[in-house]
Image (spheres, rainbow, N blue to C red):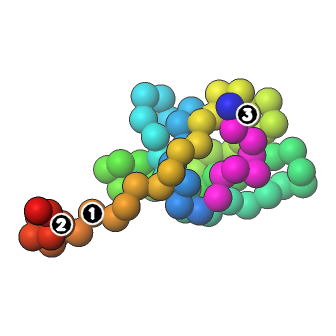
Amino acid sequence: MARLEDLTPGARVTGVVASQAVTVVQVQWHGTAALTLTYRDDAGRPGEQLLYRADEPTLGVGNAQPPISRFSRLHAA
């Protein structure tokens, strides 16, 4: 379970889109009990979702994934 306050830019969040995590781009609060979450899915598609305190039990927050560079293979040993 995550709190709405845990939804910060760069965080990986589950429970917003079925069967996948999304990356938080921006959060806009509406008082203290609701926010608009702007996110990108793993395919890079943007989306928005209005979330309420009642949604907190379904949310999970993990660490942001490091950006993938086209040079990543060159640096792997």
Residue beneath disc 3:
56
The Cα–Cα distance between marks 3 and 1, rounded to whole angstroms, is: 29 Å
Q: In the visual, does 34 lie left or right of 23?
A: right
- Horizontal and vertical percent position of residue 10: 53, 61
Type of amino acid at the residue the image marks with label 3: Glu
Q: Quadrant of residue 72?
A: bottom left
Sort mark 1 into few (<14), some (14-19) or many (20+) by Cα contacts within 10 Å: few
Residue at figure coordinates x 69%, y 44% from the top left:
50
Give residue 1's quadrant in the image: top right
Q: Type of residue at label 1?
A: Ile
Bounds of the magenta span? 2-8
Which residue occupies the foreground of this view, 70 or 32?
70
Image position, residue 70 (x, y; %): 16, 69
Secondary element type, mark 3: helix
The residue beneath circle 1 is: 68
Q: Residue at x 74, y 46 (%)?
A: 4
Q: Which mark is residue 72?
A: 2
Q: Is mark 1 in CB contact (under 8 Å) with mark 2?
A: yes
Quadrant of the image containing the C terminus: bottom left
